[in-house]
Image (spheres, helix red, strand yellow):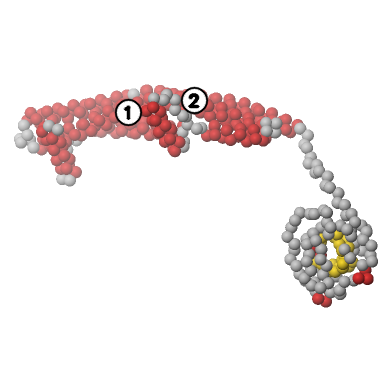
Amino acid sequence: MSVAGFKKQFYKASQLVSEKVGGAEGTKLNEDFKDLERRADVTSRAVVEVINKTSEYLQPNPATRAKLSMLNTVSKIRGQVKSPGYPQSEGLLGECMTKYGRDMGEDTNFGGALIDIGDSMKRLAEVKDSLDIDVKQNFIDPLQAVAEKDVKDIQHHLKKLEGRRLDYDYKKKRQGKIPDEELRQALEKFHESKEMAECSMHNLLETDVEQVSQLSSLVESLLQYHRQATQVLEELSDKLRERVNDAQSRPRREYTPKPRPAFDYGDVEQSNGSYAPAAASPPAYSPAPSAQFRGPSFNRSSIKNKASDPCCKALYDFEPENDGELAFHEGDIITLVSQIDENWLEGSIRGKSGFFPNNYVEVVVPLP
C-alpha cells in the first residue's frame, strides 16, 4: 500500500472512531437517497430469500439438498455433465407400492391396485423433475443473476461511498490543515460515489418488469405441473374405480374350513393316546381332600371298557403324589368310575384304579 493509500485509511478510521465514540456527526445524505437505499435493500433481500425458499419448495429435504450440491460441485470439477437428480418423494412412494404389489401378485385385487398407484406415482415424480428444471431455468437462474451482479454492485458502491464520506468528513474537520485541493478532490469523489450508488440502485428498481416476468414463468411452470399431475391422477382414479366395480361384481367367496380328521377311540384299554392335542402346561396340582380318599375300588374293575362306557381323555401327564392316585400320560383314555367331588374323579386304566384331578382330563363320555 502506498503512503497516500495508508494515509487515506488512517483518515477514514479516525473519522469512524470519532463518530462512533466521540459522537461526531458526519455528512448527511438526503432523504431521497435514503428512500432509494431502503427500497433497494428490501428488493435485494427479497431476491435472495425468494431464491432460497423456492429451492426449499422444490427440494424440501435439506440434507439431500446439501448432498446434491456437493455432488454437483464434484461433477463440475471432474468435468461430468450429468449429475444425480433430487429423489422425489412421489417416486420413493411409487417404488414401495410397486414392490409390494408385485410381491402380492398382479392377479390379486390389492396387489394390482398397488402396482397401478405405484406406476402413477413414478409418473408424478417425472413430472416433478420437469417442474424443477423449468423453474430453475426460467425463474431461479435469472434471479440468481440479479443477486450475483446487480445486488453485489449496489453493495460495492455503497461501501465505497461510505469510505469516501469518512475521508471527506475527516479532511473537512481539518480544513486549513489539509490543502484545499485535496479537500475539493475528496468532495468530488464523494459525490461521484453517491451518483454511482444511486444509479445502481435505480437500475435494480427499474428492472421490476423483468422480475414480474420471471414470476409469471414460475406460475406457468406450476400450472403446467398441476395440469399434468391432474391428468395422471384422473387416469389412476378411473383405473381404481374399475377395480372397485369389478371387485364388487364378483360373488363373495365364503370361507369353508377343511374337514377335521376323525378321532378314533379304538380299544380303550389298549389306547395310549394316538390323538395328541396341542401341548400345554398342566394346571396347578391340588391334592384331593383327605376325607374323600376311599382307596381304589377293585370291585368295579370288572366293568368292560367299551366306547359307550363313561370315559375321559388325559390332557396332560399326571404323576401321583399320594397313595390311591391314578397315574396316566397325555392322550390316555381313562374309564370313569365315579366323581368324588367337584375337583376329583375316580377311574381306571390298564388294570389300575385310582383318583385324579378333573382339570387334567377332558370328559368324552360323561358319567350317568
- Left or right placement of residue 301 versus residue 40 in this view: right
Question: In the picture, residue 178 is in which quadrant?
Answer: top left
Q: Position of residue 99 (x, y in %)?
A: 61, 34
* Dot placed on the residue nearer the N-terminal end, 2 or 1: 2
**Mark 2 = which residue?**
130
Question: In the picture, residue 284 is in which quadrant?
Answer: bottom right
SS state under label 2 = helix
- Left or right placement of residue 250 versus residue 73 in this view: right
Residue 134 can be seen, yes or no: yes
Q: Dot 1, crowdedness within 10 Å: few (<14), some or many (≥20)?
A: few
**Mark 1 = which residue?**
148
Q: Are marks 2 and 1 in contact (CB under 8 Å)?
A: no
- Front residue (pair 145, 121): 121
Q: Residue at x 27, y 29 (%)?
A: 154
Q: Which label belongs to residue 6?
A: none
Q: Dot 2, crowdedness within 10 Å: few (<14), some or many (≥20)?
A: some
Q: Position of residue 240 (x, y in %)?
A: 66, 30
- Left or right placement of residue 212 versus residue 249 in this view: left
Amino acid under label 2?
Answer: Ser
Q: Residue at x 49, y 27 (%)?
A: 129
- Front residue (pair 104, 322): 322
Screen quadrant of the C terminus: bottom right
- Front residue (pair 51, 290): 290
Amino acid under label 1?
Answer: Glu
SS state under label 1 = helix
Question: In the picture, residue 322 is in which quadrant?
Answer: bottom right
**Distance CA(mark 2)–CA(mark 1):** 25 Å
Residue 23 can be seen, yes or no: no
Screen quadrant of the N terminus: top left
Q: Position of residue 347 (x, y in %)?
A: 87, 66
Q: Position of residue 174 (x, y in %)?
A: 8, 37
